[in-house]
């Protein structure tokens, strides 16, 4: 019990988790049973203050900037669609995969990001980068609060969930996809707890999701697990079953069938539907070399947050009387398995685990919605809003961060000297070159799908690992090389008599083939 919170915001009654049996705990009055209040009174509550703090934390993450290496070629795609009024169908950015068929599977997200860029430049990108995760986090907090009725416990659960989600920071297309997911998950949670909800919106969200990002199959799996968990009719020890009625099963079955049909409503038909299968079946090198797809490293920041989350779940299960819901247990096992296998899967895991954690954190405060300190809460909300306005980054600041991360001066050198012919470039710089220097074809960018199918990704990895780099240089008749300084491949080029260092700075080095 956090007694220090009581004199400021809270009162002395304990809270309980909604629809989760708790031993010998006094329940709070339901929020709906309170008398009608004004808009300011509804906003000026302690849960709103905590939700605003969560949003402020998301804003703090977003201050890292908008220089994700993928965003630049996404902007090129958005520019192409806007100018040509059609979708990219072949590679037009590199010389190694030029003309190869290619599917822009995140076309709608790209169009939205490019529209924001045209309207507000880099600040437009930042607005999307900050606000999409912030909206997702607010829904997470709402779901956690519904399960615990303890705003402080819900806030901690949400902060832990958003910490797990930090693996996906930056202007990423997947933020649109996971926003669709949290909407679907919220509707399913409502239906699970209250046996009613707008299930008809789920197929619409899946239809949007497949056009925004390729992560939609994960939503199908979660839908299926929640549906199947309702077929267990009796409790299993401390595992609580909640079987569906025949009418509820039919509603969910119709919703699932409509969702499966809805994903075919896209410009590319079945090709877009089966793209995720291509990723996991035919892009093994992509899954091996891209950091986010690798096995979770417990030595990293995400690993620390995973350990804390696991500890709370284990200790809470052992020391409290909270019973596991069967669907919660199934989802928890699934997301930990996916996250341990591929670190980036802790992003959706954070959304689910915030809700699962909430009942175990009930009772951390003594919150009573009937006794709010509205004026103090409104003052705190105003202070948080002012802080976020002050923190809003300027265009100059966002551009400065990009310039400190990417080879701005090397691009200026290459442009001054006519591009230097065929260029071998860093993987993470391909999109930047394609956006800032469109007249220069690249060797590779972070569209790993097309470059793995063509074999270029393997050749790039071989060069970086010094596996006969001269063969790749000769095969593609490369004239210049743009790479980061201080690596093994720099030493190799320094030792080659037919190459010389033409330009270098703290960020980049340019090697040029001798005549």
Image (cartoon, rainbow, N blue to C red):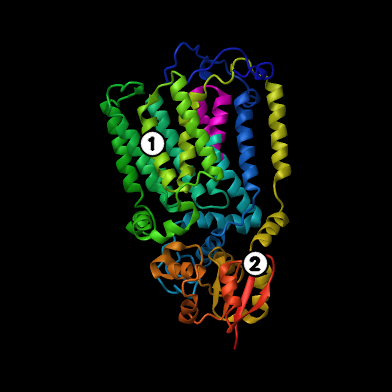
- Can you say whether 195 is above or below 35 in the image? below
Question: Residue 231: x percent and y percent?
Answer: 27, 29
Q: Residue at x 56, y 55 (%)?
A: 113
Circle 1: element type: helix
Q: Which mark is residue 147?
A: none
Question: Residue 86: x percent and y percent?
Answer: 45, 65
In the image shown, does 236 or 185 lie closer to the viewer? 236
Mark 1, other Cα within 10 Å: few <14 / some 14–19 / many ≥20: few
* Left or right: 5 as drawn, with respect to 114: right
- Residue located beneath label 2 in the image: 407
| Boundaries of the magenta span | 135-159
- Quadrant of the drawing holding the N terminus: top right
- Can you say whether 389 is above or below 108 in the image? above
User: Would you identify the image quadrant in which residue 76 lies?
Assistant: bottom right
What's the magenta bit mostly, secondary-structure-wise? helix
- Residue located beneath label 1 in the image: 333
Question: Was residue 84 drawn as part of the magenta stretch in this picture?
Answer: no
In the image shown, does 244 or 69 lie closer to the viewer? 69
Marks 1 and 2 sit apart, C-alpha to C-alpha, by 43 Å
């Amino acid at each position: 019990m956090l007694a220090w919170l009581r004199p400021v915001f809270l009162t002395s009654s304990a809270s309980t988790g909604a629809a989760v049996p708790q031993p010998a705990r006094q329940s709070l009055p339901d929020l709906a049973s309170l008398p009608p209040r004004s808009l300011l009174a509804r906003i000026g509550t302690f849960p709103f203050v905590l939700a605003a703090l969560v949003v402020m934390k998301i804003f703090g993450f977003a201050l890292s900037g908008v220089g994700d290496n993928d965003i630049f070629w996404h902007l090129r795609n958005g520019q192409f669609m806007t100018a040509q009024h059609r979708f990219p169908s072949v590679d037009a950015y590199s010389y190694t995969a030029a003309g190869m068929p290619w599917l822009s599977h995140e076309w709608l997200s790209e169009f939205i990001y490019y529209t924001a860029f045209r309207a507000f430049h880099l600040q437009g990108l930042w607005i999307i980068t900050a606000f999409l995760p912030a909206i997702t986090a607010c829904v997470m907090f709402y779901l956690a609060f519904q399960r615990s009725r303890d705003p402080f416990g819900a806030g901690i659960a949400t902060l832990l969930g958003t910490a797990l989600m930090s693996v996906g920071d930056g202007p990423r297309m997947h933020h649109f996809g996971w926003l669709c997911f949290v909407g679907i998950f919220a509707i399913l949670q409502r239906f699970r707890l209250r046996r009613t909800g707008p299930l008809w919106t789920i197929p619409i969200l899946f239809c949007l999701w497949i056009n925004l990002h390729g992560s939609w199959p994960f939503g199908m799996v979660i839908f299926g697990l929640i549906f199947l968990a309702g077929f267990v009719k009796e409790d299993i020890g401390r595992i609580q079953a909640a079987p569906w009625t025949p009418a509820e099963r039919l509603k969910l079955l119709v919703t699932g069938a409509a969702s499966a049909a809805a994903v075919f409503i896209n410009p590319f038909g079945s090709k877009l539907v089966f793209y995720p299968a291509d990723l996991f079946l035919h892009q093994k090198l992509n899954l091996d070399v891209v950091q986010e797809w690798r096995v979770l490293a417990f030595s990293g920041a995400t690993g620390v947050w995973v350990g804390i989350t696991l500890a709370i779940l284990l200790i809470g299960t052992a020391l409290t009387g909270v019973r596991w819901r069967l669907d919660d247990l199934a989802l928890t096992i699934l997301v930990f398995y996916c996250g341990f296998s591929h670190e980036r899967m802790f992003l959706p895991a954070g959304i689910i685990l915030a809700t699962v954690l909430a009942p175990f954190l009930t009772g951390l405060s003594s919150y009573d919605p009937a006794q709010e300190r509205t004026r103090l809460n409104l003052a705190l909300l105003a202070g948080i809003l002012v802080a976020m306005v002050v923190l809003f980054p300027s265009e100059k600041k966002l551009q400065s961060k990009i310039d400190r991360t990417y080879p701005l001066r090397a691009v200026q050198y290459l442009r001054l000297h006519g591009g230097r012919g065929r260029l071998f470039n860093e993987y993470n710089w391909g999109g930047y070159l394609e956006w800032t220097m469109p007249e220069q074809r690249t060797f590779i960018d972070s569209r790993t799908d097309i470059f793995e199918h063509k074999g270029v990704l393997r050749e790039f990895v071989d060069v970086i690992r010094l596996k006969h780099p001269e063969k790749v240089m000769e095969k593609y008749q490369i004239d210049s090389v743009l790479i980061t300084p201080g690596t093994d491949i720099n030493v190799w080029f320094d030792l080659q008599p037919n190459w010389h260092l033409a330009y270098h700075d703290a960020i980049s080095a340019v090697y040029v083939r001798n005549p």
